[in-house]
Image: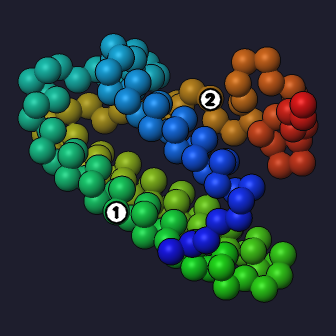
């Protein structure tokens, strides 16, 4: 198990509290409007694909956990900044690959069930889009960071 210094513990605890609070809020609040202009699933379609999409979601979570664990092992073994950068790049690439595989699997489920496939390329937000009021370049590599 990882050991954390005294200054890391409060940060980790805060992150967990914020993350768990968001998860609870997401489960208890009214459903959000679907993103994009793609087709909406009817209740019957949602029920039809639910078992497969749930299975895919579990598989996706397990794959992402494995990527994070591999990334942690790599980062722990890194001996230089270049090694750390390589680990981070490999983890990012693996996550992007996993995301694409998950989308492809969902696409196959929709097609098998005769449901129009959503257009995931029209995502909202994306890289470089920060919270409301964020300075220009927030979230960009080398961009402005909110300092207080």
Rate crowding at label 1 as few (under 14), some (14 to 19) or many (20 or more) other CA atoms within 10 Å. few
Q: Secondary structure at mark 1?
A: helix
Q: What is the x, y in percent for residue 84?
A: 75, 74
Q: Quadrant of the C terminus?
A: top right
Q: Is residue 58 above or below residue 78?
A: above
Residue drawn at point x = 71 percent, y = 59 percent: 6
Q: Nearer the viewer, mark 2 or mark 1?
A: 1
Q: Position of residue 26 (x, y in %)?
A: 39, 26
Residue drawn at (57%, 79%), measured in percent from left and top?
A: 73
Quick check: marks 2 and 1 in contact, CB under 8 Å? no
How far is mark 2 from mark 1, CA to CA?
26 Å
**4 above or below 126?**
below
The residue depicted at 76 percent of the width and 80 percent of the height is: 83
In the drawing, does residue 84 fall left or right of residue 147? left
Image quadrant in which you'd find residue 66: bottom left
Residue toward you, 9 or 142: 9
Residue placed at 35% from the left, 56% from the top? 60
Residue that numbered label 1 is attached to: 62
Q: Position of residue 94 (x, y in %)?
A: 53, 66
Residue 7 picture location, percent across and down: 74, 55
Disc 2 secondary structure class: loop
The reply to whether residue 137 is visible in this rendering is no
In the image, 6 versus 36, the foreground residue is 6
Mark 2, Cα crowd under 10 Å, few <14 / some 14-19 / many 20+, is: few
Residue wearing tag 2: 125
When the figure is inspected, residue 133 is found, relative to residue 129, above or below; the finding is: above
Can I make out residue 103 in this image? yes
Looking at the image, tell me whether mark 2 or mark 1 is earlier in sequence order. Answer: 1
In the rendering, which numbered label is found on residue 134? none
Residue 129 against residue 102 in the figure, above or below: above
| 85, 44: nearer the viewer | 85
């Amino acid at each position: 198990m990882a050991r954390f210094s005294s200054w890391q513990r409060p940060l980790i605890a805060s992150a967990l509290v914020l993350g768990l609070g968001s998860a609870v809020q997401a489960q208890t609040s009214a459903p959000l409007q679907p993103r994009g202009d793609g087709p909406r699933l009817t209740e019957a379609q949602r029920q039809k694909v639910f078992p497969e999409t749930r299975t895919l979601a579990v598989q996706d979570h397990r794959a992402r956990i494995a990527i994070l664990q591999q990334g942690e092992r790599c980062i722990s073994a890194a001996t230089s900044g270049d090694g750390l950068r390589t680990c981070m790049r490999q983890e990012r690439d693996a996550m992007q690959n996993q995301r694409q595989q998950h989308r492809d699997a969902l696409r196959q489920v929709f097609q098998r069930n005769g449901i129009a496939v959503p257009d995931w390329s029209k995502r909202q937000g994306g890289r470089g889009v920060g919270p409301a009021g964020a300075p220009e370049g927030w979230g960009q590599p080398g961009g402005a960071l909110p300092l207080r």
